[in-house]
Each structure stands twice: as structure tokens, then as C-alpha cells.
Image (cartoon, coloured by chain):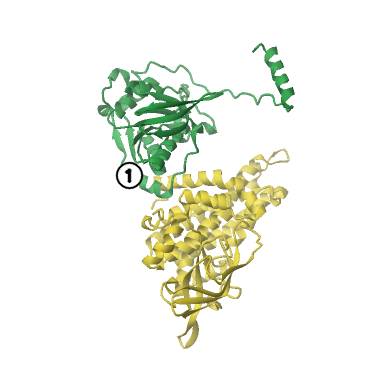
Chain colours: A yellow, B green
């Protein structure tokens, strides 16, 4: 067992780090303040090939492994949580399900431009009444001739108004399962600009404020029959499988945020003087940093292990859940401690750790709350 | 079109320079990077490739670990990498380096050779022009813009206060300034391909028409007596005046210091 990255992964990390420092970090504070989607950064990431890292080359991607993709989201999130989640939602939640469940025609039509970054992707599962209870979907899709007709709405959709291609889930009927009638859910690919597909309100969020989070509204939205993704009625499985991958992406984002906060704090405590010496000289500071660094390291190992599991195993739900649970809770804890160690300055927007603490919170909530991750892990233990 | 780009792995001087007790650079204590002027030269070659179509070969002389900069160049979009490495080539000054590179490049077909203006570890700016001399081709140094016109290149050569527009028939050699362009990033897929790619490794035996007496430490007329870090200049004086007043102010200073 070797915990060293090989040379190509080291070089990839160096690339992501350099890009993040040079292109992303200088805009992070402004993106947060203005709540504006960082389109300029996305355009640069498109050029650098960051929008299709784990997608095979024949579909316009970079042909790299999940670990490389994870390191990209990690390094971006170290300096800007918003930028990290743009790549994560696009790659894990839109490219990945089309790659895994799409037909060859769907891959050529939708995945190739997504992986090249010519189009941005999003994923719509959550509804006002269907968060953790994904079965509580109200959005319906009815087949009418050669078209599916969608009616309903989705909320809290990352990349909301900025995306071009959406993977959307809707109820397509009722089926009997173990003597009970249950909703049959299917997945669809919907393009921006389709008649009947509009946007609702933009969410005003605590963190990741540059991320475009919108409500999606479908009113007699007609899409071609061939935009059904995977088999009819398999939507719930597609959603859960997609979220397994998505959780690795969010775990990487959380890991990056925690690392960024730790790095900022290490620099700060060496400079900040109280009682005539740098606060780094106090044992409390040292012990806090030691705990933060240990947890960050543990989170990184879980996240990388989950990425390796995605590359080599058919199912990796537990690995993904553990990585997300631990990395998200570490991000929250480490950023909170980072603010504490910065004292009053850490509570101001002048310092990155204030933003990082707000950004960290969402990682415990979206793509499955920490409670959901515990359900996934424990149900595997008790099977 | 075939373009050869000479690149060098240099210590990153951004974080300060470290020395061995004998006064030579402690390269192991500093991060190794692609020399910035060379990177601009590579970017220029890659842009010519994008625009006109070209095969870009990168070549470096150095220790076996200099292979890393060749892989970086491949990950940016270069097509082939050649590492010239041999113990007998060690300790080379600019003369021996340019002789070595010339001996290696004589094996290749090329229309254009691009080098960086100078390396940040030696700052001599000699290897490019010397190389052109050995290969008997024209050189245009300090390029800030490069265009192709049939079988010629049109280059803007930068000076402190002006630039020259020069036209030269290919094959020719151009030395590039870091200001020439903003080098592209490697792509993640490019990195993966670069590590699958084969790097050609040449030694002394592969150098064409090269005398032993021109190689390595023995073939180097320059001996370094002592190396030291640059003494940082002060920030200088800053004044805010309107244009007429500032002209008077500067003239007065120049007269007082007997510059004019």
C-alpha cells in the first residue's frame, strides 16, 4: 500500500494549484460579495480542460481518472468554494449520468459538448417537498406521441440559470412494490431554451454565493421521446448512482475548503502578535492546528479512497458516503476553528476564513445531508 | 512546418536563491520549473502550430530529472521531447551548452528554432545566438511578436524604447521574451498523455559534428568564481506632479546628477 501520488497526479495537482492561485483566488472575495457567477473563470477552465476531466477522450473529455478530477475540485475549493461546486455539479451530476446511462446518440449530442465545456450541465432532483425524501417527487412526465410533457418544478439547482443541459427527474407512473403503490421515477435530459422550461427565483444563500442556485419550472415542457435517460422507471436508481459520484465531488469541495482554512490560519497565527509574541507560540494555537491538520489529512485519505473506489469498483456508495460525511464535518469544524483563531478579524469579510466557514456549511447539507450519509453507511453495516 | 524549441529546467528564484557552501546554486533546495522565457518560446511555437500547423519538438540538455520539463511541454501540446544527458556534458557554460544543443539539433529537420532569451539561473542570453552561429542560420533575438509569411518569419524585436520589424528566411532562430505571450496551461489529459509518451534520450554519441574539446566543464571557457543573490534595489522615489512640472522635476534631477 502506497500513499504517494505518482508523477502524473503530482503534475496534475501542480496544474490545478497554479490555476487556482492565479485565476481563481484573486476573484473569490468579489464573487462572494457580488453573488455573481464567475463566467470568466469558467471560460478559462473550459480552455484548460477542467470541465470533462474523468470523461473518456472519445466523448470530448480528458480521459483522466476520478482521482485527478477530485484533486481539481479540491484545489479550486481551497481558494473558492463556488468555483469548486460549479465543476463538481457539472461533472458528477450531469456528465456522469449521461456517460453511464446515456445512449450513444445522447452521448454524442449532449456529453461531447458538456465534456469539452462548450455547454454547462446541471441536475434537477430536489423539489420543495422532496429533499432527503427523493421519492416525494411531484414533477410529472407524460408521454404524448413522440414527446414527453413535463410539469412541475425543481428547487435549489446548482448552475441553475447558467447551465445548458439538465438531467431532470420526474414521475412517469405508479408501480406496485411489495404490495404498495409507489411512484415510478424516470430521468430525462432537458435543454435550456425548450418551450415551457423557465427559471424561478434565484436563491440568496449563506455561502457559495457565486454559484447560480435557481428554481426550475416546467409548464407543459415538451421534450423529444429520445431524451429519456436510461430505462423508463429506473430514475431513482440513476439518481442514487449519480449522487454516489456527486458525493465524492462534494467531499472534495469540503476537503478543499478545510485545507484552505487551515493554510490561511497557519499563515495568520505566525503574524498575529498578542502579549508580545506570535499567537503561534501559544500551546492552545498549536494544539488546535494539530487537530485541524490531522482531521484534514484523514478526510483527504477518505476522499482519495472513495475516488479510487469509483475507478475500480462497481458500487462505492459507502466509500462515497463516508468521504462526504467526514470531509463535510471536518470542513465545518476546521473553518469554525479557523475563524476562532483569527479572533475578531476572522469574523470580518476582509479575511478568507469568514467566507470559508459560510461555504463549508452547505457541504453538510447538499447531495445528501450528513444524516443521509449516516443512513447509507449504517444500512450497509446492518444488511 | 517543423519547430524545435530549446527549454531549460531552472530553479524557481521566486522564493529566493539558495547557495551551497562553495558558492554554487543549491538546486536541490529550490523548486525546478521551466525557464519562463523558454515557456514563452514554447507557447509561441504552439500558437504557430495552432495557426499554421506544425510539429513541435522540445529539446533540453540537463540531468535525467530534466525530463520533467519535457513532459510539461508535452502536456502543453508539444509533439516530441528529446533529453540530451551525459556525464561528459556536465558543468557546461553557454559555449559548451550551445555546442551540445547544436550537435543534437543537427540530427533534426527544422524550419524554426525558438529559444528563450535567457535563463533565470544564469541570465546570460548567449545560448540562443551562439546556437544560430554554430548552425549557420540567422537569429532574431528579443522577439515580442512572431508571424509566418510564406517561407519567412516576420518578427518584432524589442528594444527599450522601440521595436524593429525584421523579416528572415527560414530556417532561422528566434529568442523569445517572457512578455511575448501568456503561456497556456497544461491540460489534465495532456499530462496523462505526456506520461505515456516516450522521451528520446541522447548522449554524447548522438551529437553530430561536435568536438570533445567543446563539451562539458572541460570545453567551457567560463569559470564561475563566485555567485551571489541580487542586491534588491530600493523602491526609488515616487512623485505625483502634472506633466509639465514632472518634466521640470526630472530634468532638474538629471542635471544635478550630471547625467545630462
Q: Position of residue B133 (x, y in %)?
A: 36, 20
Residue displayed at 46% across by 16% down: B225
Q: Nearer the viewer, residue A309 or A274?
A: A309
For this view, does B98 lie left or right of residue A318?
A: left
Residue displayed at 68% across by 41% down: A272
Q: Position of residue A275 (x, y in %)?
A: 73, 40
Q: Position of residue A191 (x, y in %)?
A: 50, 66
- At numbered mark 1, what does the secondary structure look like: helix, strand or loop? loop
Quadrant placement of the C terminus of chain B: top right
| Residue extending farthest bottom | A179
Q: Is residue A95 above or below residue A153?
A: above
Q: Nearer the viewer, residue B107 or A196?
A: A196
Q: Nearer the viewer, residue A156 or B241?
A: B241
- Say which residue label 1 marks: B197
- Residue A360 visible somewhere in the drawing: yes
Q: Is residue A58 above or below residue A231?
A: above
Q: Position of residue B234 (x, y in %)?
A: 64, 24
Residue displayed at 42% across by 27% down: B167
Q: Nearer the viewer, residue A227 or B193?
A: A227
Q: Could you classify mark 1 by the number of other residues whose Cα lies within 10 Å: few (under 14), some (14-19), or many (20 or more)?
A: some
Quadrant placement of the N terminus of chain B: top left
Q: Is residue A208 above or below residue B210?
A: below
For this view, does B172 lie left or right of residue A203?
A: left
- Residue B114 visible somewhere in the drawing: no
| Residue extending farthest left | B205
Quarter of the image holding residue A132? bottom right
For this view, does B168 lie left or right of residue B249?
A: left
The chain carrying label 1 is: B
Q: How many marks?
A: 1
Amino acid at each position: 500500500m502506497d500513499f504517494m501520488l505518482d508523477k502524473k497526479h503530482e503534475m496534475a495537482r501542480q496544474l490545478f494549484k497554479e490555476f487556482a492561485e492565479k485565476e481563481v483566488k484573486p476573484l473569490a472575495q468579489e464573487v462572494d460579495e457580488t453573488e455573481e457567477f464567475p463566467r470568466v473563470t469558467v471560460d478559462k477552465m473550459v480552455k484548460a480542460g477542467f470541465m470533462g476531466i474523468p470523461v473518456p477522450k472519445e466523448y470530448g473529455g480528458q480521459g483522466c481518472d476520478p482521482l485527478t478530477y477530485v484533486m481539481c475540485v479540491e484545489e479550486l475549493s481551497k481558494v473558492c468554494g463556488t468555483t469548486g461546486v460549479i465543476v463538481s455539479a457539472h461533472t458528477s451530476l450531469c456528465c456522469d449520468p449521461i456517460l453511464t446511462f446515456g445512449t450513444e446518440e445522447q452521448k454524442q449530442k449532449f456529453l461531447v459538448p458538456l465534456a469539452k465545456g462548450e455547454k454547462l450541465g446541471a441536475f434537477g432532483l430536489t423539489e420543495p417537498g422532496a429533499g432527503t425524501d427523493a421519492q416525494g417527487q411531484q414533477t410529472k412526465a407524460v408521454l404524448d406521441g413522440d414527446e414527453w410533457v413535463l410539469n412541475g418544478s425543481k428547487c435549489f439547482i446548482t448552475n441553475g440559470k447558467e447551465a445548458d443541459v439538465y438531467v431532470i427527474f420526474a414521475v412517469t407512473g405508479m408501480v406496485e412494490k411489495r404490495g404498495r403503490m409507489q411512484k415510478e421515477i424516470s430521468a430525462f435530459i432537458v435543454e435550456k431554451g425548450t418551450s415551457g422550461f423557465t427559471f424561478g427565483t434565484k436563491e440568496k444563500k449563506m455561502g457559495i454565493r457565486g454559484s447560480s442556485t435557481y428554481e426550475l419550472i416546467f409548464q407543459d415542457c415538451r421534450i423529444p421521446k429520445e431524451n429519456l435517460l436510461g430505462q423508463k422507471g429506473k430514475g431513482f436508481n440513476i439518481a442514487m448512482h449519480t449522487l454516489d459520484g456527486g458525493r465524492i465531488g462534494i467531499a472534495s469541495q469540503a476537503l478543499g475548503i478545510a485545507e484552505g482554512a487551515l493554510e490561511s490560519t497557519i499563515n495568520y497565527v505566525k503574524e498575529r502578535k498578542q502579549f508580545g509574541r506570535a499567537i503561534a507560540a501559544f500551546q492552545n494555537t498549536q494544539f488546535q492546528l494539530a487537530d485541524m491538520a490531522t482531521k484534514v489529512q484523514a478526510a483527504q485519505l477518505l476522499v482519495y479512497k472513495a475516488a479510487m473506489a469509483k475507478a475500480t469498483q462497481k458500487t462505492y456508495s459507502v466509500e462515497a458516503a463516508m468521504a462526504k460525511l467526514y470531509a463535510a464535518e471536518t470542513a465545518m469544524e476546521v473553518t469554525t476553528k479557523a475563524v476562532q483563531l483569527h479572533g475578531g478579524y476572522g469574523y470580518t469579510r476582509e479575511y478568507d476564513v469568514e467566507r470559508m466557514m459560510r461555504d463549508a456549511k452547505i457541504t453538510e447539507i447538499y447531495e445528501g445531508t450528513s444524516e443521509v450519509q449516516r443512513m447509507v453507511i449504517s444500512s450497509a453495516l446492518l444488511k | 512546418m517543423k519547430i524545435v524549441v530549446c527549454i531549460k529546467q531552472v530553479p524557481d528564484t521566486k522564493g529566493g536563491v539558495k547557495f551551497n557552501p562553495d558558492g554554487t546554486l543549491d538546486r536541490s533546495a529550490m523548486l525546478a520549473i521551466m525557464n519562463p522565457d523558454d515557456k514563452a518560446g514554447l507557447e509561441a511555437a504552439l500558437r504557430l502550430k495552432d495557426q499554421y500547423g506544425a510539429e513541435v519538438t522540445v529539446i533540453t540538455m540537463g540531468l535525467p530529472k530534466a525530463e520533467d520539463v519535457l513532459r510539461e511541454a508535452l502536456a502543453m501540446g508539444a509533439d516530441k521531447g528529446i533529453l540530451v544527458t551525459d556525464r561528459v556534458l556536465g558543468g557546461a557554460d553557454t559555449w559548451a551548452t550551445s555546442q551540445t544543443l547544436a550537435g543534437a539539433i543537427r540530427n533534426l529537420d527544422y524550419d524554426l528554432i525558438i529559444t528563450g532569451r535567457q535563463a533565470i539561473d544564469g541570465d546570460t542570453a548567449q545560448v540562443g545566438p551562439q546556437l544560430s552561429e554554430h548552425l549557420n542560420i540567422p537569429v532574431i533575438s528579443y522577439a515580442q511578436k512572431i508571424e509566418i509569411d510564406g517561407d519567412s518569419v516576420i518578427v518584432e524585436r524589442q528594444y527599450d524604447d522601440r521595436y524593429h520589424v525584421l523579416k528572415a528566411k527560414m530556417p532561422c532562430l528566434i529568442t523569445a521574451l517572457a512578455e511575448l505571450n501568456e503561456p497556456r496551461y497544461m491540460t489534465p489529459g495532456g499530462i496523462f498523455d505526456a506520461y505515456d509518451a516516450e522521451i528520446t534520450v541522447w548522449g554524447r554519441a548522438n551529437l553530430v559534428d561536435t568536438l570533445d574539446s567543446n563539451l562539458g566543464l572541460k570545453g567551457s571557457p567560463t569559470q564561475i568564481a563566485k555567485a551571489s543573490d541580487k542586491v534588491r534595489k530600493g523602491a526609488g522615489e515616487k512623485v505625483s506632479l502634472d506633466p509639465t512640472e514632472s518634466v521640470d522635476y526630472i530634468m532638474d534631477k538629471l542635471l544635478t546628477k550630471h547625467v545630462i
